[in-house]
Image (tube, rainbow, N blue to C red):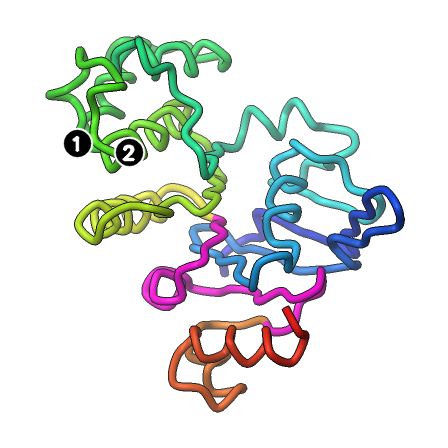
Amino acid sequence: MNKEMVEVKDLTKVFSAGNVAVNSISFSVLENQIFGILGPNGSGKTTTLRMLTTILSPTSGSVKVENLDYLKDQQKIRLSIGYVPQKDALYQNLTAYENVDIFFAAYPYSSNRKDRIEKVLKEVDLLDVRNVLVRRLSGGMAKRLSIAAAIVHKPKVIFFDEVTMGLDPVARDNIWSLVRRLKESATVIMSTHYMDEAQRLCDDLIIMAEGSIIARGKPEEITKEFNARDLQEVITTIAKEHNV
């Protein structure tokens, strides 16, 4: 049985003026899973992801990553995870290789760093453009470069925030193939607006509305529970029920 890589208990985030963005949610993610966080706009999924990646502090509750406690072991957690934000945080006037090298510098690594960078660029099919400036890359290439920067240190857990947002169908399919390969050696947690993406990629997922978890399970289990044809129909139903 696969071990738990991420454990969330009663996680809550309250912003100013008493705005409850995430309301006491609990779930766990197993090793080598692709785990999805879905929901309508304003449901709390992005806030949840930002707490799981230590970017945002929770108001209450607990998060453990590889049994490391969020409050006690933040630096260790950051060294063991990778994070791909919705908006690429790349240096436009540097090359693909230079970008990965800069991000890699934040992590301890004892082996040959140049070999590792070239290997990860090959994994995301960018080795041939390693000396090309980022501003000259396509949107799909830039997103794959962001993934390379996030996985160069061989993280055990990788977080994706709307990773295929705005990409064309071919670029999306390339990212999907890459995510499936990453699952072989890491656990993937992803937020997404695309229901077909969740349906095709996720082994398990949660659906959120108004900061709470409304549904949890495999995509086929959730569609059956809601008597829906697909996850898009489920989300539409939830949005109507919660007026979001």
Q: Earlier in the sequence, mark 2 or mark 1?
A: 1
Q: Which residue is mark 1?
A: 125
Q: Residue at x 35, y 60 (%)?
A: 197
Q: Where does residue 12 sit, x and y in percent of width and height? A: 79, 51
Measure how far apart labels 2 and 1 are at the Cα level.
Answer: 8 Å
Residue 211 lies within the magenta run: yes
Label 1, secondary structure: give it.
loop
Which quadrant of the figure has residue 201? bottom left
Name the kind of residue labelled 1 in the image. Answer: Asp
Query: Quarter holding the C terminus?
Result: bottom right
Determine whether 42 is above or below 166 in the image.
Answer: below
The picture places residue 155, in percent across and down from the top left corner, at 46, 32
Which of discs 2 and 1 lies nearer the camera? The answer is 2
Q: Are marks 2 and 1 in contact (CB under 8 Å)?
A: yes
Disc 2, SS = helix
x, y percent for residue 94: 30, 9
> Relative to residue 201, is residue 130 drawn left or right?
left
- Residue, disc 2: 144
Alpha-carbon neighbours of circle 2 within 10 Å: few (<14), some, or many (≥20)? Answer: many
- Chain part drawn in magenta: 189-215
- Mark 1 neighbour class, 10 Å CA radius: few under 14, some 14 to 19, many 20 or more: some
Give whichever of 188, 91 is nearer the camera.
91
